Amino acid sequence: MSTEHAPGSSPTTHPEVVRTTRGMCHTCLQEVPAAVVVRDGLALLEKTCPEHGITAEVLSRCPSYWKAVDDFYFAVNSEVYPQRDYLVRMTETCNLDCPICLAKANTEDTPDLDLTGLEKLLSEKRRIKVDLMAAEPTIRKDLEDWVRKVKANGHICALHTNGIRLSNLEFARRMKEAGVDEVFLQFDGFDDEAHKVLRGRPLLDIRMKALQNLREVGLATSLIVVIAKGLNDRAVGEVFHFAMKPENDHIREVFYLGLRILGSARDAIKTKGSKLAEMSLMPDETLQMLTEQVPGVRRDDVQVFNKLYFALLSSFRVKKCLYVQHYLVARDGKGGFTGFGDLVDMKRLDRAANRYARQFPKNAALARGRFLSSLGVHTLTPGMVPLLSDMLRMQLLLRVGMNLGEVPRRLVILGFITACDPQNFDSQVALNCGKGELSVDGGFVDSGAVANVRREGRFDTTDRRPGKRRES
């Protein structure tokens, strides 16, 4: 959620400046000076536009947490790493008309993406992840052919979908046989009234059938749970407990995606006075909801885990966005779980991570070696022994590419994420965006965050030519 001040005015209390950066005025979409600050018990991204004044996006209501993670992230990400994950926006049309659609599907008469660029990418890169998505890739008749091409070139193939076509078992089976490694399924909780607000229609029965089919064919699944403040907050805990059920061990990941102001949502706010802006969330706020709804997930543990996570990625030279934070839990096989913080000595691991951050700017190679050695020593605890092979597997996947199909069934990854929009865009965060993008309107862009805000600028300056929803 953002707060605004009159043009030329300034907030009343003096902030602690965490770092300066460049942001975007969400009114005129011009790049403007910005700073991450702590003020009045909040961590904020404050931006100053000469024309539209000062605006502030709430990053966290626990500023000590955010500042610690922000400081650590930039301490260990001073190098530039190659992009290893690409979003491919296969089509801008969909078989739904979601009021919150990031892609603004079906509102412009846009042709499907010519995939010669993808063919070039597949041949030039080694073991990347290819995310087939936006708006609804399953409506493309050549989807199976492209899945096979991705796999034939040795890459990881991820399918992002609303689940409608996957509710057909035969289609799910064809996706598995073609070579899809992992499915990212929109799953916004169990309340169909919330689905009507977010997606325009009830979808629970369809998504439950899609999940059943994914389990039957053996496709690893990530649940993408869009959370809108005041609408489906309780879905945070409900979906977590659902994922822990023994029969749902094909669910390897739960991503809590805070509602953002992009595409159709931003258009509705501008043209219809929609209240969606008041429902927007950053990753830290969805984390707070989880800690309140699920005893056993603690903020202090998540903070240390993210230091370890960002340090490992830095050690392996992997790009990853600050706005994508994680935690890891282990299933107990009975519907319960044990958090990472209850398996290891978090204080020692925190010290090892902090030492890495101090040493990295001076001697990156030495810092990497010492950190990886310390990580091995400090995870040799009684609680971790039964999971050692699983943890070693996870570390390898971070190094070579995170394929959910290879994540051990005992583990569940939790993600607290956001999409970059004009309100939360931070140019320094965007430099390390873990997703490149290929699209019909933008071509190749190495940062998905940059692609998002450029697309909003195009939406603002071009005539809208209504498109047509394509049925599955």
Image (spheres, rainbow, N blue to C red):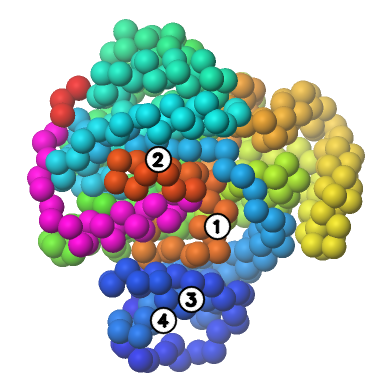
Circle 3 Cα neighbour tier, 10 Å, few/some/many (<14 / 14–19 / ≥20): many
Q: Nearer the viewer, mark 4 or mark 2?
A: 2
Q: Secondary structure at mark 1?
A: helix
Q: Measuring 59% from the left and 80% from the top, which residue is drawn there? A: 17
User: Which residue has dot 3 on it?
Assistant: 34
Describe residue 158's horizontal placement relative to residue 326 as left or right.
left
Structural distance between the alpha carbons of marks 4 and 1: 21 Å
Determine the CA span between mark 3 and mark 2. 28 Å
- The residue at 25%/33% (across/down) is 112
Question: Disc 4 residue type?
Answer: Thr
Q: Between disc 3 and disc 2, whose residue precedes?
A: 3
At a point 65% along the width and 53% down the height, the residue shown is: 80
The reply to whether dot 3 and dot 2 touch (C-beta < 8 Å) is no
**Element at badge 2?**
strand
How many other residues sit within 10 Å of disc 2, few (<14), some (14-19) or many (≥20)? many
Q: Amino acid at mark 1?
A: Leu
- First in residue order: circle 3 vs circle 4: 3
| Residue 235 image-quadrant placement | top left
**Among numbered discs 3 and 1, the one appearing first in the sequence:** 3
Mark 3: amino acid:
Ala
As measured in the structure, the alpha-carbon distance from the residue carrying label 4 to the one carrying label 2 is 31 Å
Indicate whether 17 appears above or below 398: below
Badges 3 and 4: C-beta atoms under 8 Å apart? yes
Which residue is tagged 1? 431
Report the residue marked by disc 4: 48
Residue 147 falls inside the magenta stretch: no
Expressed as whole percent of the image width and height from the top left, the position of residue 307 reads 70, 53
Q: What are the residue bounds of the magenta stretch?
A: 447-469
Is residue 291 or residue 179 the one in the foreground?
A: 179
Q: Quote the CA–CA distance across marks 3 and 1.
A: 15 Å
